Amino acid sequence: MSADPATQENSSAKTGGKHLAASGSILGVAIILANAGNYLLNVFLGRWLTPAEFADANLMVTIMLLVTAIAVSLQLIAARFASINDATGDHGETAAMAAWLERRAGIAGLAVGLTLVIGAPAWRTFFNSESALPFVILGVGMPFYLVQAVGRGVLQGRLTFRPLAATFIVEMVVRVVAGVSLVALGAGVEGATLGLTLSFLATWLHVRILTSHREAGPLSATTVRSVITYAGPVGVLLLGQIIINNGDVLIAKRFLEPETAGVYAAIALVGRAVFFLSWSVATTLFPAAAQRDQAGEDSNGLLYSGLGIVALMGVGFVVGAKLLGGIVLGEVFGPEYGGVSNQLALYAFATSLFAMANLIVSHHLSMGRRRESFLLVGGGVVQTILLLVGRGSIDSLISAQVTAMALLLAVIAASHVLGLRSKQPATVTAHPTTITPSESHLDEKRAAA
């Protein structure tokens, strides 16, 4: 079934600047609220737990963020193909693709969960944790966490950002209420981890309700091949995000003293806010850029607008951290966390550079371009080497990240400029490197129509 003019007009309206600004703002507010709730939970944990216990609780969050790479990979794959099918009006194939991905997400979730559960004693020893039980609790929630990511991707791809925004609010509310209640009752790190797992279950249930109306059509072999092919560069992007976003916390937990690792965990927790807030921009632009590319339209204007927004976020956060960071952390978490304004500002600066680089990579990935994803992984490798060299103190760890992220943004920006120069001046419809559902498959649909 080919897209009729009404479908094309609706798709163009969805990717217009005004619609994206309005719906993206709603998603942005939801993500800000979700992050605010998560930070509220961490403030509570910082007050009720010792720095060593807080480091253990933050380790559970870091492991969750490692698994997020798989979840976001599934979400981006679903979003990419849902956005293309939405442009052509083929919703039945989107539902079939989602069901196919959900089955594989469940299998991956079971594998990750068993790795955490069975290996819990070994993980406890390796990370110098007090108990192995949090690893078990977190492992139980992994299948739900990965399956819900597919449904979120479908919502994202169809540019239905209000329901998508609601899923982040539900996840946050359950996590905060359950985590605070359980820790207040004396459950400690185990209670905080159970709050995480319960939030996965609640989000999975909510997403399932939002997408339960899907009527699956037949899933073509060409779509399966395209999904599998596209999974490669998406996985590379998320591998780079894993290394860059979480490697420093794991290295700090492994090599610094428990009390110092707890202080570093607090700096990283707050400093990474720039990246997670910028994710709303990437989430909004990704499917819109994919649809514009599919229609042969230029999407660089979306990218430049997004970069401007992320840069403003970064400047505001760095200045705020420099002026008030240490004071706020000292008042909120306790005197052990005071006096870190300079470190927090530098960490936020490094994260801002990474957020801008990541947005460029995500933009290229929405059109199936792979080079920038590999550059991101290269940046992660450089950062890891520098972190291991400077693993002896908080200051050296943060300096390593500033250096690595400045280099990464410069290289990725240069790659983007070179890509623009290499384009054929008169070419507007040919996208030889774009990974989309097979053109022959689309031709079959048009012929059938």
Image (cartoon, grey):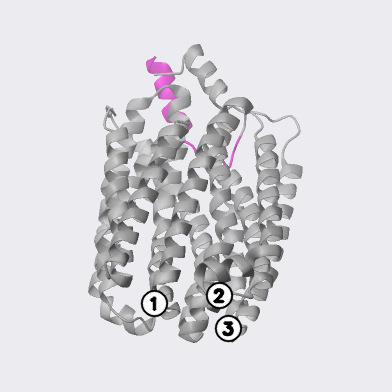
Distance from disc 3 to disc 2, alpha carbons, whole Å, reads 19 Å
The quarter holding residue 100 reads top left
Q: Which mark is residue 391?
A: 3
Nearer to me, 44 or 291: 44
x 69%, y 53%: residue: 316
Q: In this figure, which residue is indicated by the disc labeled 1?
A: 53
The C terminus - image quarter: top left
- Whether tag 3 and tag 2 are in contact, CB under 8 A, the answer is no
> Is 76 located above or below residue 287 in the figure?
below
The N terminus - image quarter: top left
Q: Nearer the viewer, mark 3 or mark 2?
A: 2
Q: In this figure, which residue is indicated by the disc labeled 2?
A: 337
Q: Nearer the viewer, mark 2 or mark 1?
A: 2
User: Residue 50 in the image: x percent, y percent?
Assistant: 42, 78
> Is 193 located above or below residue 219 in the figure?
below
Q: Amino acid at mark 1?
A: Glu
The earlier-in-sequence mark between 3 and 2 is 2
Left-right relation of 147 to 74:
left
x 56%, y 36%: residue: 25
SS for callout 1: helix
Q: Is residue 364 magenta?
A: no
SS for callout 3: loop
